[in-house]
DNA sequence: GCCTAAGTCAAGC
DNA sequence: GCTTGACTTAGGC
């Protein structure tokens, strides 16, 4: 297919990791939380590169959401359309990659707590997000 | 050149 | 859609 080197800056892979792109999408929203489909739309809208091979990168994106501790899942409320859950950025992710390379962080974001406290923390954190929402 | 984060494939829930 | 694991690729030191 296309020869490398002649690309029109459109379909080139952006110098961002999926983690970066996802964090950007979430942070662009005033509520700091988005459903999966909105994250997809955000990325596709800004980077034509991601308008192809959707099955591949969307699966990878989902993998990142689950694998990294820096994304927290917000259970949707009964009034929302029955798609997936909402995704938000963990509060402690403030300057995770927002410092230099958007490709790779110094260390993978992992809570320093024990596994037990981690589970509790993530649950209560999600609960806190819900209960502290103004509307 | 090594270490390990990030990306891919794919199965199972 | 979400989670997990095994494997490959590639950045940073």
Image (cartoon, coloured by chain):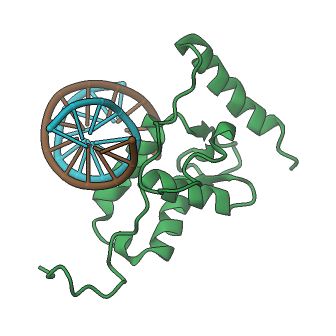
Chain colours: A green, B cyan, C brown
Judging depth in this view, the residue of B10 and A91 nearest the camera is: A91
Q: Is residue B1 left or right of residue A108?
A: left
Instruction: Locate the N terminus of chain A and report the quarter of the image it occupies.
Output: bottom left
Q: Please, is residue A44 above or below residue A81 in the view?
A: below
Q: Is residue B7 left or right of residue A17?
A: left
Residue lying at the far right of the rendered structure: A134
Residue A100 in the image, given as x and y percentages of width and height: 52, 56
Residue A129 in the image, given as x and y percentages of width and height: 75, 38
Q: Please, is residue B9 above or below residue B11 in the view?
A: below
Residue at image position (62%, 14%) is A117
Q: Quadrant of residue B12?
A: top left
Q: Quadrant of residue A55?
A: bottom left
Judging depth in this view, the residue of A67 and A111 nearest the camera is: A111
Q: Quadrant of residue A24?
A: bottom right
Q: Please, is residue A36 above or below residue B11 in the view?
A: below
Residue at image position (47%, 41%) is A106
Residue A112 in the image, given as x and y percentages of width and height: 57, 21
Residue A132 in the image, given as x and y percentages of width and height: 84, 39
Residue at image position (69%, 39%) is A91
Q: Is residue A17 left or right of residue A31?
A: left
Total numbered circles: 0
């Amino acid at each position: 297919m296309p020869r490398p080197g002649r690309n029109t800056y459109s379909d080139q892979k952006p110098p961002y990791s999926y983690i970066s792109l996802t964090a950007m999408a979430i942070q662009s929203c005033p509520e700091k939380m988005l459903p999966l489909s909105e994250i997809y739309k955000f990325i596709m809208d800004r980077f034509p590169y991601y308008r192809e091979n959707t099955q591949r990168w969307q699966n990878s994106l989902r993998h990142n959401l689950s694998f990294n501790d820096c994304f927290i899942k917000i259970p949707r409320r009964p009034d929302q359309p029955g798609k997936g859950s909402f995704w938000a950025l963990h509060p402690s992710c403030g300057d995770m990659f927002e410092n230099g390379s958007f490709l790779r962080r110094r260390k993978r974001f992992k809570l320093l707590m024990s596994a037990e406290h981690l589970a509790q923390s993530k649950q209560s954190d999600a609960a806190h997000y819900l209960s502290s929402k103004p509307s």
